[in-house]
Image (tube, rainbow, N blue to C red):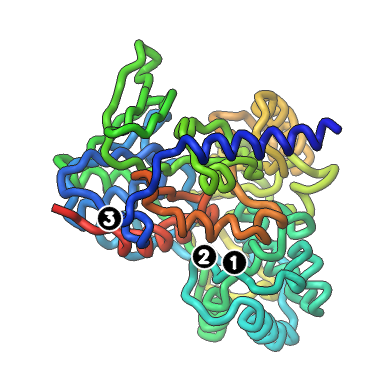
């Protein structure tokens, strides 16, 4: 009975909000996002999506853009290299190969000869379900029968288990949860046929297909906003308390935990994680209510720690069976960037080589590493303390001697729809709703948890923006 009452209450609230919401203009209904050159555009969220979209607006000719970021710096969560942006904004932040199948780098399942055939089978299967399209938000499936399962069930049902190691590496190691629990749709979204083709092409030439950045991604986002000081105003340590979409839009903020203030806007860009503790506009319409509420998300814990050198060092160590079930929250991956920078491309190229990578003096003394832990649920206040305790125990078991924790960050990660929400068309409803009530929605909550996705989404979205004067 309570569940029924909850559903009735949610529906009733949605109807009331829809009735009270401002009516979209004719220009908004025709798909265009219309703004004046000097309109006050406020972006809530200074992660990759917000920073990138701000630069696109500047290039479009807009002059008055403000980014509100709750933390002390822009950048947010960054996982995927974006090659064109590096060339334009941060050319000294070089790409270095990260080869997961080379001894001394990472252990993953070794592909058999059968995998070539199965990769092509996967591409054919992917195309038959979603059609041919450029990477990004896939077309809405007309029939969910072939996707009504988890990623692992999809591989098993379609006799693609020989590729399980590859899929677990590209999906789970990125923090997207376990194939045993995540909807197959998200696996197909991330592992686009173009990714497979690029891997096959690189493998055929003995070249790497995975990269990391020498200085990290934070430098890229800072370089991007620094290029446009007169058009982009970045306000860090600024928490958004309330948003009311009157004319003009009223945004109540608190900066550096002092007395709240008001920021006025002519257009609002929401670039925040909708899956966890976000301040939403107070006048959501029915469509917005559906796609901005009740998203699932995960807790992804990133920790910088030091330990003594191990007898056999590697760029990373991966435990593919962790992060799910009883192993949720255990140490899932470590990365030693110093080794990747020192010797990113060993002379030998294949895991079958009998001699491990010789890291020389770089593999001696105290080593700084990054550790990753995953919880397939929303962030909890107890996660920091609990994950530290678990991490120290796991590091001891893995022979990381004398480990000490330096810094830890608990991220709300991979906001996503459940299968029912996907079948109801929630991600596509967001795209159709863009620009209504002077609001644009961007970021991982409306696309996918990767820099590649938010950049592709932004690039497509900016084409709908019209400058009215």
Is residue 302 in view? Answer: no
Where residue 208 appears, x then y in whole percent? 51, 72
Say few, some or many: other residues with alpha carbon within 10 Å of mark 3 (under 14 / 14 to 19 / 20 or more): some
Q: Tag 3's secondary structure? A: helix
Would you say 220 lies left or right of 181 here? left
Say few, some or many: other residues with alpha carbon within 10 Å of mark 1 (under 14 / 14 to 19 / 20 or more): some
Mark seen at residue 137: 2
Residue farthest to the top? 259
Where residue 69 appears, x then y in whole percent? 38, 33
Q: Are marks 1 and 3 in contact (CB under 8 Å)?
A: no
Tell which tag, 2 or 1, sits nearer the viewer: 2
Query: In the rendered image, which residue does mark 3 sit on?
Result: 56
Say few, some or many: other residues with alpha carbon within 10 Å of mark 2 (under 14 / 14 to 19 / 20 or more): some
Query: In the rendered image, which residue does mark 1 sit on?
Result: 189
Q: Are marks 2 and 1 in contact (CB under 8 Å)?
A: yes
- Disc 2 and disc 3: Cα gap in Å? 19 Å
Is residue 146 in view? Answer: yes
């Amino acid at each position: 009975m309570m569940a029924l009452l909850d559903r009735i209450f949610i529906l009733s609230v949605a109807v009331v909000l829809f009735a009270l919401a401002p009516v979209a203009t004719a220009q908004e209904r025709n798909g265009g996002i219309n703004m004046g050159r000097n309109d006050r555009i406020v972006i809530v969220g200074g992660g990759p999506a917000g920073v990138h979209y701000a630069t696109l607006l500047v290039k479009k000719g807009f002059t008055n853009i403000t980014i509100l970021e709750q933390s002390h710096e822009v950048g947010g969560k960054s996982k995927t290299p974006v090659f064109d942006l590096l060339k334009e904004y941060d050319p000294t932040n070089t790409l270095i190969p990260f080869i997961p199948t080379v001894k001394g780098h990472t252990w993953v399942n070794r592909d058999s000869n059968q995998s070539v055939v199965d990769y092509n089978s996967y591409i054919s299967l992917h195309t038959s379900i979603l059609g041919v399209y450029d990477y990004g938000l896939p077309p809405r499936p007309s029939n969910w029968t072939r996707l009504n399962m988890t990623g692992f069930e999809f591989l098993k049902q379609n006799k693609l288990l020989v590729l399980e190691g590859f899929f677990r590496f590209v999906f789970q190691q990125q923090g997207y949860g376990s194939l045993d629990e995540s909807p197959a749709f998200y696996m197909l979204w991330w592992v686009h046929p173009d990714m497979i083709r690029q891997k096959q092409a690189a493998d055929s030439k003995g070249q790497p297909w995975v990269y990391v950045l020498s200085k990290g991604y934070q430098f890229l986002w800072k370089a991007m906003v620094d290029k446009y000081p007169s058009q982009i105003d970045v306000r860090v340590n600024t928490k958004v308390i309330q948003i009311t979409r009157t004319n003009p839009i009223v945004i109540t903020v608190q900066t550096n935990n002092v007395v709240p203030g008001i920021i006025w806007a002519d257009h609002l860009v929401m670039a925040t994680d909708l899956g966890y503790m976000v301040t939403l506009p107070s006048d959501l319409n029915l469509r917005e209510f559906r796609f901005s509420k009740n998203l699932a998300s995960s807790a992804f814990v990133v920790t910088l720690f030091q330990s003594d050198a191990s007898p056999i060092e590697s760029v990373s160590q991966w435990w593919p069976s962790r992060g799910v079930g009883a192993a949720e929250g255990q140490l899932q991956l470590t990365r030693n960037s110093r080794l990747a920078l020192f010797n990113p491309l060993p002379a030998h190229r294949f895991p079958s080589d009998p001699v491990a990578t010789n890291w020389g003096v770089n593999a001696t003394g105290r080593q700084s590493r990054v550790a990753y832990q995953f919880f397939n649920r929303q962030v909890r206040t107890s996660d920091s303390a609990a994950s530290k305790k678990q991490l120290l125990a796991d590091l001891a078991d893995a022979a990381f001697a004398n480990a000490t924790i330096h810094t830890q960050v608990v991220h709300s990660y991979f906001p996503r729809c459940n299968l029912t929400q996907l079948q109801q068309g929630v991600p596509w409803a967001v795209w159709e709703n863009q620009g209504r009530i002077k609001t644009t929605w961007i970021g991982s909550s409306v696309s996918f948890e990767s820099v590649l996705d938010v950049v592709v989404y932004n690039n497509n979205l900016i084409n709908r923006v019209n400058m009215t004067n």
